[in-house]
Image (cartoon, rainbow, N blue to C red):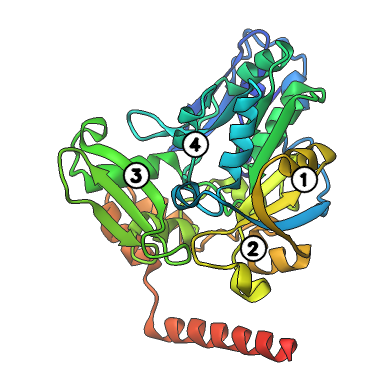
């Protein structure tokens, strides 16, 4: 049976809870806001199925993609509403047009991030755009299986560990299943996300106060995106650039990632997904004529099924080398190191204002800022020299 003694060895994918025929496993939130499985030993039959569907226990060796592309949608509106080039929307629309189902992450009425599905093109808008919070999978693996058994096409999108969990849960390949994951830095605590929103809302009801949220608004361009929150009944919106937004500062400083993200079992395209998407950071250096600062998708094709799906959509594309992709997207292969201040963050969380806590622990001294700028200058200089 599943017994979590080391929290870095559980990705929270819910595969074990959904496969249990006796409903002996339930997910419980820990003091950091992450869900972990707990087994009721009174009803557990010790069949071992939960261990067979665990992506940590059943770790797979990484691989290289079959093909790599820079890509962007012809539709400017879709691109502007998407985090990168809008490729996910095009893939999803094709599945819907074929009578299929699309699973993805969306906000619920309380602005928590959950997994859900849609059968309509209109419903895809909720899945569009990045959401830097671990989504709650719920029963979506079981729902996807039901649709597949009924002969429906299914596109299931999620983090690499969620896709690995789904593939193990299904226990067989389905011709009508297309799996799409993305380049993942790591997933922050859902509890911290809600605490942050409550701080902004001054403890008002989030459902009553928030109209919409965009983690990656491109109003100032794709590379200099803003976090934007739209309050209800107000023309004034809350706008902050990436480097000033508190939640994003803490996230990118690795203060509150899930412990398993620091030892991710699904790096190097080992999730089993058909397609891996991401932002093609560094496109201005790799393919400068392709970049207009409106967003370019990195598309890594991992299977023949993925290749067929990608070839079925009308998209501007340019094939490129894998080394160019991973050079500017190291999270494809490398897990983020835990912040040395992570334990301090959670230790002081209950006694210190969230705003001041994140500011204090992400503050960089003048000397460190200068060293980082020098490091970036050296890297740029080396790239120019190598091109010559």
Q: CB under 8 Å between callouts 3 and 2?
A: no
Residue 83 rendering spot, x and y as whole percentages: 50, 52
Q: Residue at x 63, y 14 (%)?
A: 41
Q: Mark 1 or mark 2, which has the lower sequence index?
A: 1
Q: CB under 8 Å between callouts 4 and 3?
A: no
Position of residue 132 in the picture relative to residue 244 (left or right): right
Q: Which numbered tag is attached to residue 329? A: 2
Badge 2, how many Cα within 10 Å: few under 14, some, many 20+?
many
Element at badge 1?
loop
- The residues tagged by marks 3 and 1 sit, at their Cα atoms, a distance apart of 31 Å
Q: Which numbered tag is attached to residue 213? A: 3
Position of residue 217 in the picture relative to residue 44 (left or right): left
Residue 79 rendering spot, x and y as whole percentages: 50, 51
- The residues tagged by marks 2 and 4 sit, at their Cα atoms, a distance apart of 23 Å
Choose between 278 and 348: the one closer to the eye: 278
Element at badge 4?
loop
Q: Which numbered tag is attached to residue 127? A: 4
Badge 3, how many Cα within 10 Å: few under 14, some, many 20+?
some
Q: CB under 8 Å between callouts 1 and 2?
A: no
On the image, numbered disc 1 is attached to which residue?
270
Q: Mark 3 or mark 2, which has the lower sequence index?
A: 3
- The residues tagged by marks 1 and 2 sit, at their Cα atoms, a distance apart of 16 Å
């Amino acid at each position: 049976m599943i017994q979590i003694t080391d929290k870095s060895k559980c990705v929270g994918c819910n595969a074990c809870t959904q496969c249990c025929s006796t409903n002996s496993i339930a997910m419980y939130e820990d003091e950091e806001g992450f869900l972990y499985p707990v087994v009721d030993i009174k009803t557990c039959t010790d069949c071992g199925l939960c261990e067979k569907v665990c992506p940590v226990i059943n770790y797979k060796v990484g691989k290289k993609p079959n093909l790599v592309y820079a890509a962007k949608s012809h539709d400017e509106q879709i691109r502007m509403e998407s985090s990168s080039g809008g490729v996910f929307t095009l893939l999803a629309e094709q599945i819907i047009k074929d009578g299929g189902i699309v699973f993805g992450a969306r906000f619920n009425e309380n602005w928590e991030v959950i997994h859900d599905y849609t059968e309509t093109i209109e419903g895809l808008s909720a899945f569009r755009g990045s959401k830097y919070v671990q989504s709650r999978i719920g029963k979506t693996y079981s729902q996807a299986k039901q649709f597949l058994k009924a002969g429906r096409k299914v596109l299931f999108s999620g983090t690499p560990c969620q896709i690995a969990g789904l593939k193990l849960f299904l226990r067989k390949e389905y011709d009508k299943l297309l799996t799409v994951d993305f380049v993942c830095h790591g997933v922050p605590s859902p509890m911290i996300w809600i605490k942050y929103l409550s701080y902004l809302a001054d403890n008002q009801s989030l459902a009553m106060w928030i109209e919409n949220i965009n983690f990656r608004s491109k109003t100032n361009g794709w590379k200099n995106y803003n976090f934007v929150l739209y309050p209800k009944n107000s023309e004034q919106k809350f706008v902050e650039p990436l480097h000033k937004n508190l939640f994003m500062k803490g996230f990118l400083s690795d203060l509150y990632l899930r412990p398993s993200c620091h030892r991710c079992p699904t790096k190097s395209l080992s999730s089993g997904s058909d397609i891996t998407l991401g932002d093609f950071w560094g496109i201005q250096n790799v393919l400068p004529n392709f970049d207009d600062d409106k967003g370019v998708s990195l598309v890594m094709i991992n299977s023949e099924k993925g290749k067929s799906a990608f070839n079925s959509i009308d998209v501007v594309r340019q094939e490129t080398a894998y080394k160019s992709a991973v050079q500017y997207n190291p999270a494809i292969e490398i897990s983020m190191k835990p912040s040395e201040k992570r334990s301090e963050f959670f230790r002081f969380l209950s006694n210190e204002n969230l705003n001041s806590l994140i500011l204090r622990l992400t503050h960089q001294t003048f000397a460190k800022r200068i060293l980082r700028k020098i490091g970036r200058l050296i890297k740029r200089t080396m790239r120019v020299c190598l091109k010559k």
